[in-house]
Image (cartoon, helix red, strand yellow):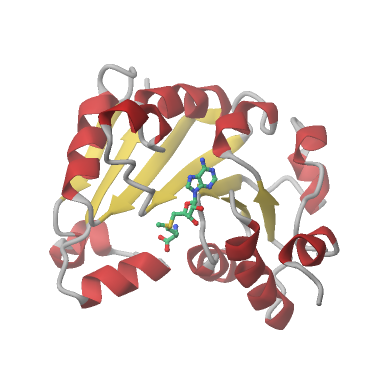
């Protein structure tokens, strides 16, 4: 039986040498459309819905684990979208993959909480990661972060200022916040946790 690594290696939806495309992502898509990324995309539902709704934007879903990425590839086999690609990598190396200002927007959805203090720097909204995002995000770019995890959201809010970012908007109940809910696209985890009655938190941040 073919393993998930082999199936990923054969997939036309995966960019296999992401480091070689630094500064050249427009060539991958063959146009000059803005590029938005989701870090930790899981099975890719959010990226696929967003890409289908916005054909004039290019999307890249980044996922660390082959087994999860495989599910996204299988969905793309059924409904291929020209403006979506996947990368299997650890986001720690994101600065080696995108050039300064190459990314127009970053989505972080239901990032792993890493509850132990000593693992704080592994959390995707940590100041260490915000520094990496600063290096690749366009000047007027935004990060949009959603979670149902109170501790992670509180932590993420505390990281904004020390990392040199600014809060544009935040809610602790996205699904009952008319303004922030406009145009919301649900992720797999958002669907799962909101159906259990958990409120969904969201922030949007930028820097000057
Ligand atoms: N974003 C999806 C959603 O909202 O349904 C999936 C959320 S899931 C809890 C978090 C995902 O992030 C997992 O698939 C995990 O493998 C991935 N992930 C965690 N840390 C990562 C990292 N450093 N680089 C890339 N992916 C990562």
At horizontal 45% and vertical 21% (from top left) the residue drawn is 131
Nearer to us in this view, 95 or 134: 95
| Residue 175 percent coordinates (x, y) | 20, 67
Q: In which quarter of the image is the C terminus?
A: top left
Q: Residue 77 lies in what quarter of the image?
A: bottom right
Q: Quadrant of the N terminus?
A: bottom right
| Residue 168 percent coordinates (x, y) | 26, 36
Would residue 43 appear left or right of 147 to someone viewing this image?
right
Nearer to us in this view, 142 or 113: 113
- The furthest residue to the bottom: 78
Would residue 28 appear left or right of 201 to someone viewing this image?
right
At horizontal 62% and vertical 68% (from top left) the residue drawn is 72
| Rendered position, 50 above or below 77 | above
At horizontal 45% and vertical 48% (from top left) the residue drawn is 107
| Residue 65 percent coordinates (x, y) | 60, 54
| Residue 146 percent coordinates (x, y) | 31, 52
| Rendered position, 181 above or below 52 | above
């Amino acid at each position: 039986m073919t393993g998930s690594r082999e199936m990923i290696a054969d997939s036309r939806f995966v960019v296999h040498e992401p480091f070689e495309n630094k500064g050249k992502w427009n060539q991958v898509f063959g146009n000059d459309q803005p590029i938005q990324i989701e870090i930790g995309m899981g099975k890719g539902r959010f990226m696929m819905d967003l890409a289908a709704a916005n054909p004039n934007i290019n999307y890249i879903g980044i996922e660390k684990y082959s087994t999860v990425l495989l599910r996204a590839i299988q969905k793309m086999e059924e409904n291929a979208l020209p403006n979506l690609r996947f990368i299997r990598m650890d986001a720690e190396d994101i600065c080696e993959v995108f050039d300064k200002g190459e990314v127009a927007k970053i989505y972080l959805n239901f990032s792993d909480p890493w509850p132990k203090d000593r693992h704080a720097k592994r959390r995707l909204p940590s100041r260490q990661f915000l520094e990496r995002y600063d290096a690749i995000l366009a000047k007027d770019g935004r990060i949009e972060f959603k979670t149902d995890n109170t501790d992670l959201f509180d932590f993420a809010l505390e990281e904004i200022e020390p990392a040199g970012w600014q809060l544009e908007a935040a809610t602790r109940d996205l699904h009952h916040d008319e303004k922030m809910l406009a145009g919301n696209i649900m992720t797999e985890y958002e669907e799962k946790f909101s159906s259990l009655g958990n409120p969904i938190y969201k922030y949007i941040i930028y820097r000057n």
